[in-house]
């Protein structure tokens, strides 16, 4: 059974691309920006900083 699961994971890993993962994330996004809680105050993520990570 472990060999079967390992094979499934390998096939999934080999077939997933950054574009597919990005599309899935966009499709699941609810339109709200993430809120980060810090010791000082909550703040919204800067979307420009996120886009620069690519």
Image (spheres, rainbow, N blue to C red):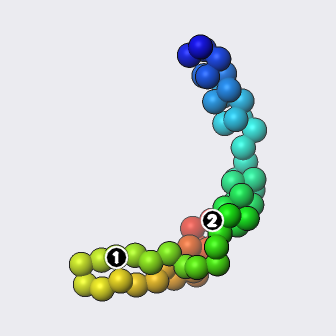
Q: Can you give x and y, in whole percent of width and height, for residue 15 in the image?
A: 75, 38
Q: Which residue is drawn at the image coordinates 59% and 14% (left, top)? A: 1
The reply, left or right, for residue 38 in relation to residue 34 is left
Q: Earlier in the sequence, mark 1 or mark 2?
A: 1
Quarter of the picture containing the C terminus is: bottom right
In this picture, is 25 found above or below 10? below
Q: Can you give x and y, in whole percent of width and height, for residue 9 in the image?
A: 63, 30
Label 1, label 2: how far apart the Cα atoms are: 24 Å
Q: Which residue is mark 2?
A: 54
Q: Which residue is mark 1?
A: 37
The reply, left or right, for residue 20 in relation to residue 54 is right
Q: Residues within 10 Å of mark 1 (few under 14, many from 20)?
A: few
Q: Can you give x and y, in whole percent of width and height, for residue 12 in the image?
A: 70, 35
Give the residue at the far left of this rendering: 39
Most foreground residue, 37 or 19? 37
In this picture, is 2 found above or below 27? above
Question: Dot 1 lies on which element?
Answer: loop
Q: Is residue 17 visible?
A: yes
Comparing marks 1 and 2, which lies closer to the viewer? 1
Q: Which residue is drawn at the image coordinates 30% and 77% (left, top)? A: 38
In this picture, is 44 found above or below 7? below
Q: Which residue is drawn at the image coordinates 58% and 79% (left, top)? A: 32
Q: Residues within 10 Å of mark 2 (few under 14, many from 20)?
A: few
In this picture, is 13 found above or below 3? below
Residue 52, quarter of the rendered image = bottom right
Most foreground residue, 30 or 40? 30
The reply, left or right, for residue 21 in relation to residue 48 is right
Q: Which residue is drawn at the image coordinates 68% and 64% (left, top)? A: 28
Question: Dot 2 lies on which element?
Answer: loop
Tags 1 and 2 touching, CB below 8 Å: no
């Amino acid at each position: 059974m472990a060999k079967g699961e390992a094979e499934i994971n390998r096939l999934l890993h080999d077939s997933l691309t950054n574009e597919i993962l990005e599309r899935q994330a966009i499709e699941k996004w609810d339109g709200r920006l993430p809120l980060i809680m810090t010791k000082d105050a909550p703040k919204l993520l800067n979307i420009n900083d996120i886009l620069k990570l690519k």
